[in-house]
Image (cartoon, grey):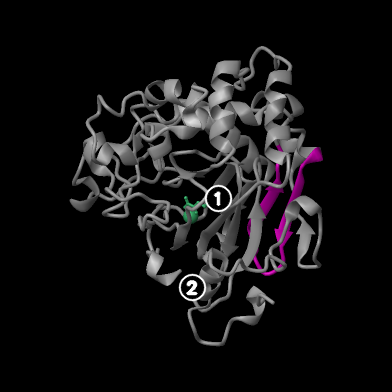
Amino acid sequence: MAKMASSLVESGEDAFRKIFKFYKRRNLPPDFCDVIDFSKGLPSDKIVPAILDPSAVSDVEATRVGLQSVRDWRAFSLQGYPGFIFISNPFLLGSQPFWVRQCLKTYSQKPNVCNLDMHMSPSDTQDIWGKSVHSLSSPHSGKRETKTLLDRLRWVTLGYHYNWDTKMYSANHYTPFPADLHLLSFQITAACGFQGFNAEAGILNYYRSDSSLGIHVDESELDHSRPLLSFSFGQSAIFLLGGLRRQDPPIAMYMHSGDVMVMSGQSRLLYHAVPRIISAPQGRTALEMEGCSLASPQQGCSVVEPVSEKDWAVCSRYIQSSRVNVTVRQVLGPGQSFPDTPSAHQRTDAGQTVGYHDRAADEEGENRKSSSSCDSVDTAET
Ligand SMILES: O=C(O)CCC(=O)C(=O)O
Ligand SMILES: [Mn+2]
């Protein structure tokens, strides 16, 4: 019988790496019995309801961005991880499709930066969606030999564009952060007790079924007192949350479509990783997403717009085998600015600034999570 993750670790070793490899391995499928599933409520006494501030976000404000009333959110904290909040899919039925479409169609557009810019010209990567949809909508797309640009998309950066080489953000490489995603993040952080969150940088990771994301800490932001938000759409993932040291064994949890994670306080700088993508529980993605056609027109001032059937056909097919994760970060504290160092300003062009790495790891061996304190976990370790 497969060993449980918790029985693997010996003291003093890189426990995170060991557990990462345990969940990543393909030859002998791991036992998932230690993986926390927040969608099942409070399965363990380590999980406690998180304290939210429903008065910080009115129901109208929540609806505008496609969220349920804060009173209805199922939000959890984990004992031993102060500042970590897991909100089990707080989205209104029928609003996830809008956010999925934004991730695939809108945020992948210029001036945002993506992995394809590293080896293609701006004119070639200017309309990833437009250049991919024809092929993705055709009835024979299952048999396609050439991958579309959307198939090859691995990451997109927003706002202050993260530089994978220097592991820094810089004042000179900034494009406007999407207003809709800022508003969504602002409302969620407000409900979690953080006033005035300013979404300044975003990283979207596009995972195929064999992708993973290496062990890392997100510490490049200059103000660590601001929370970091994470949104997941499409297929599920195993997320590992560790400690401040690699020797601290991580806990494993499922992230399903619509789940939101807030890392703040003492949990803001913890090691974490995604060793494995797994199929969404039967019917869940289809069910929650399909609400799109049923989505009632939201009130006039909503940022969540209906998704056309044509767009949804492409999005729903994409997420049947993929996962999209969006992290939203505030880089600077109130009144803070970037230090005036040469390295912080060394590159300015959108097309050249971000590193050439494909961030999420594939079985093709591309495994470059180059964010600070991150290990590259290559296929030799699997
Ligand atoms: O995909 C995830 O759930 C994690 C993403 C992440 O940690 C990151 O982008 O820094
Ligand atoms: Mn991270």
Compared with 302, 92 (above or below) is below
- Quadrant for residue 28, please give it: bottom right
Residue under the image location 32 percent in, 54 percent down: 167
Residue drawn at (63%, 64%) of the image: 252
Residue type indicated by callout 1? Pro
Between disc 2 and disc 1, whose residue precedes?
A: 2
Gap in angstroms between the C-alphas marked 2 and 1: 25 Å
The numbered disc on residue 17 is: 2
Identified by mark 2, the residue type is Arg
Q: Which residue is mark 1?
A: 227
Numbered range of the magenta stretch: 72-90
- The x, y position of residue 165, in whole percent, is 27, 53
Camera sees residue 226: yes
Query: Please, what secondary structure does the residue beneath circle 2 have?
Result: helix
Q: Is residue 51 visible?
A: no
Which quarter of the figure is the N terminus placed in? Answer: bottom right
Number of marks in the image? 2
- Is 79 one of the magenta-colored residues? yes
- Tell me: 123 left or right of 194: left
Residue 71 figure quarter:
top right
